[in-house]
Amino acid sequence: MMNDITDPPPLSLPPALAARLAQRPLVLGTRQSPLAMAQARETADRLRLTYGLSSDAITLLPVVASGDKVQDRALRELGGKELWTRELDRALVDGDIDFAVHSMKDVETVRPAMFHLAAILPRADVRDVLLGADSIADIPQYGTFGTSSPRRAAQMLHVRPDLTVKLFRGNVATRMARLANGEADATLLAAAGLARLDMQHIGAPLDTGDWLPAASQGAIGMETLSANKDMTAFLSGVNQAASARCVSAERAFLERLGGNCHSPVAAYAKLSNGEIHLRGELYSENGADKIGDHIRFMANDDDHSADLAAALLHRAPRSIQKLFTGI
């Protein structure tokens, strides 16, 4: 006998959006990089499927982010993570786009009240992937490690203090080309980004038991104006509660730390049997000092992420405390 199970029927659009779609498509804003465009297409596809929309119901408006314009300087010298969101924020305020899609690890922890994070898609692989060597131990002694991430630099120097860190900025293809040209012996890229670019089979993924990722790594988020309740309701239709809960816990951990884009911090939350397990690590800039711990709490309880952050800051040496303002 054939299985009677069918896909659930599409969700209904908020009436105001249904009326507007009869006049014009919804506009999704995204950064112009290949990875950002892949994330935007995934987002649009999920929304179309969930609401039974036509292929032309959502259009993409790519923008060049400030952070993409300068590739030879560290992000902390240019203004921080807001360089990834500034142009999209302006487009939302000006009405050029209806909502924006972000890689959540690139979104500043505290956002202006006028913007609302309405949905998180199912989170992808959170791991970092090593390129250039089969393992960290296989990177040549006194070799060069390319990265623009203070977290990755500190983590690598903690286990391989013999290495030299070289600034590696740019999109995935740019960093891979620099590695291939011999500018470094190894680099790290996000597994989620590689998968979204159909390159999931390259490199050596690092187990999260030994190597924590950046907070919110692998998560795609959608923002709209807080005042736009119809758009908020629309986007919430594709929100995955488990992923959103874990991302929220990791971002609450960062907020309590009071860190910024040059604070080496790693965090990873998992949800299992109604319980959040959050692990966090703080490093000194040179990787010499590290402190880490974990906390468990019920997902329907108050968020205790800040408790873990406060405990780590209290126990951390001065080399780490000075990098955070939450002490």
Image (spheres, rainbow, N blue to C red):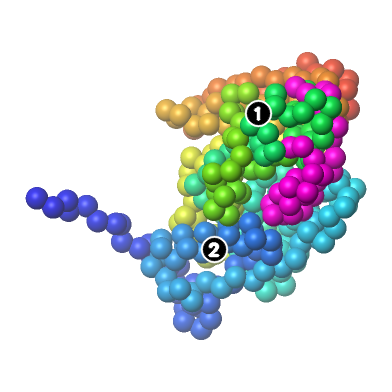
Q: Amino acid at mark 2?
A: Arg
Dot 2, how many residues are within 10 Å of its Cα: few (below 14), some (14-19), or many (20+)?
Answer: some
Q: Quadrant of residue 323?
A: top right
Secondary-structure class at tag 1: loop
Q: Earlier in the sequence, mark 1 or mark 2?
A: 2
Dot 1, how many residues are within 10 Å of its Cα: few (below 14), some (14-19), or many (20+)?
Answer: some
Residue at point 70% right, 24% down?
137
In the picture as drawn, the residue positioned furthest to the bottom comes out as 23
Residue at point 47% right, 63% down?
45
Q: Which one is in front, 79 or 16? A: 79
Task: Determine which residue is flagged by label 1.
Answer: 135
Query: Image check: 286 left or right of 239?
Result: right
Q: Position of residue 176 (x, y in %)?
A: 71, 49
* Mark toward the viewer: 1 or 2: 1
Q: Quadrant of residue 128?
A: top right
Residue at point 88% right, 50% down?
73
Image: magenta residue range: 159-186
Residue at point 61% right, 49% down?
193
Q: CA distance from mark 1 to mark 2?
A: 33 Å
* Quadrant in which the C terminus is drawn: top right
Q: Which mark is residue 206?
A: none
Work out whether 192 lies above or below 320: below
Q: Are marks 1 and 2 in contact (CB under 8 Å)?
A: no
- Determine if the magenta segment contains residue 59: no
- Determine if the magenta segment contains residue 182: yes
Query: Image check: 315 left or right of 277?
Result: right
Task: Determine which residue is flagged by label 2.
Answer: 41
